[in-house]
Amino acid sequence: MSGLFGVVSKGDCAETLFYGTDYHSHLGTEFGGMAVFGEGFTRQIHSINQNQFKSKFLDDYRRMKGNKGIGVISSYDEQPIYLNSKYGPFCLVTYGLIENAEELVQEMLAKGVSFSEVTKGNVNVTELIAKMIVQGDTLIDGIQKMWAKIEGSCSLMLLNKEGVLAARDRLGYTPVIIGKRMDAWAAATETAAFPNLDFQTVKYLEPGEIVQLNEEGMVQRKAGGKTNQICAFLWIYSGFPASDYEGINTEIVRERCGRCLAKHDKDIEVDVVSGVPDSGSAHALGYAMESKKPFRRPLVKYSPGYGRSYTPTSQKTRDLIARMKLVPIKEIINGSRIVLCEDSIVRGTQLKNFTVNKLWDNGAKEVHVRPASPPLMFPCRYCLSTRSISELAARKAIKAIEGSDIDDISEYIDPKTDKYKAMIEWIRRDLGVTTLRYQLLDDMVKAIGLPKERLCLYCWNGESAK
């Protein structure tokens, strides 16, 4: 995952850029970067693997001068990229996943295109995107031709002397939202960046739409398309609670998810409703409101220095964060029958080893796990998260039941089948919990409030947009 922020103001923009970018810190763990255009370009990139964005960039932004800029929180690549091209110099930040990146790199190398930036031994994908864009007849044409060639998704912001180009990927998988205040225009992937900086949301870009922000306002450079499949996981897990996507608030969706879970739980008695912090908390609040059972916090998150355990690519890093960030409160746990709401079960290792065990070790009487989304069946095709089928808890269960990997898993996706029930029971035993009940896909879609065809549900049902 990554987060993007861009701004053009009538005065200096560096402070706004600094705080606006920081409001995307929950979306990435590897690199942060900012670029400002004034008399020329000023660019800075830092690793934020062991540090918060604010601490790394506090001195930098005070030295940056200019009225337009872009920033990024990146889960993988070092960004922004600077490129001097036939269209003049520009800086670029991107958000998405290019599945055929290696193929595109080899194709461009064969044409004589060189690459200078390397991230973790591979060509920097943002540099690849930049060099694909400049193959077009114009920047706008280049962005469209890039979209036509990539497999995956790519939203981006491009900074040059004319302003900031903001482009939402052609499937609409990742969001880009425009905000306005008296002296500035901004683009962001999280509307949570707007309120405290006095921006009002004025537009949610359509899939494939490109706009330019300058000192005078916003100009559409390309209209959006009809296909829209925004990632449903934004509302369930990855988005910030205060953020809206397509005009729908994340916190409210999570509360509705929790209510749906509680409506199916008439057969258990519990003392405490809790959530795995932070994203599971709102799901638990909705469950508590519907069930009329008390919401309490048997596990609290120690926030300083610990980010999300889902986003790092290393299992060792994920495990360390999961172990260290949650602190149990024995006085609440001991002797309690607990419903534990979670946004999802991806790999299952953290929930099993570092969450559920903390409840049992501190005297829980029962532990009932309620994920707010269905079993994850497919690695994400559009964002850097799970990268292999073998990682997923549900696929581990299917392999154990079948004795080997199988191609047709349709019966395991359908919650009415015996095979689905066997899969859930296998995961329940593996987690070591009293009961396990997943959210139904239709209930999750209903909680979000958009038609199913406008959501990307690929990681649950394997169906992707054309």
Image (tube, rainbow, N blue to C red):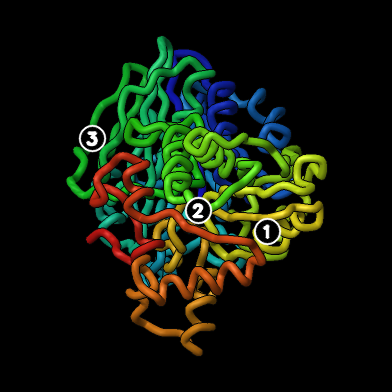
Q: Quadrant of residue 149?
A: bottom left
The dot on residue 267 is: 2
Q: Does label 2 or label 1 sit earlier along the sequence?
A: 2
Picture quarter with the C terminus: bottom left
Outermost residue to the bottom = 403
Q: Which residue is mark 1?
A: 318
Q: Nearer the viewer, mark 2 or mark 3?
A: 2
Q: Does label 1 or label 3 sit earlier along the sequence?
A: 3
The residue lying toward the viewer, choosing from 421 and 100, is 421
The residue sitting at 49% across, 13% down in the picture is 11
The amino acid marked with disc number 3 is Arg
Q: CA distance from mark 2 to mark 3?
A: 56 Å
Q: Which residue is mark 3?
A: 221
Q: Tell me the element at label 1.
A: helix
Q: In this rendering, does residue 210 appear at all?
A: yes
Q: Quadrant of residue 310?
A: bottom right
Q: Does label 2 or label 3 sit earlier along the sequence?
A: 3
**Is the residue marked by circle 2 packed among few (<14), some (14-19), or many (20+) residues within 10 Å?**
few
Q: Is residue 237 left or right of residue 113?
A: right
The amino acid marked with disc number 2 is Asp
Q: Tell me the element at label 3.
A: strand
The residue lying toward the viewer, choosing from 266 and 54, is 266
The dot on residue 4 is: none
Instruction: Answer above or below: position of 318 versus 248.
Output: below
The residue lying toward the viewer, choosing from 126 and 295, is 295
Instruction: Answer above or below: position of 132 versus 252.
Output: below
Q: Position of residue 366 (x, y in %)?
A: 68, 55
Q: Position of residue 453 (x, y in %)?
A: 23, 51
Q: In this rendering, does residue 41 appear at all?
A: no
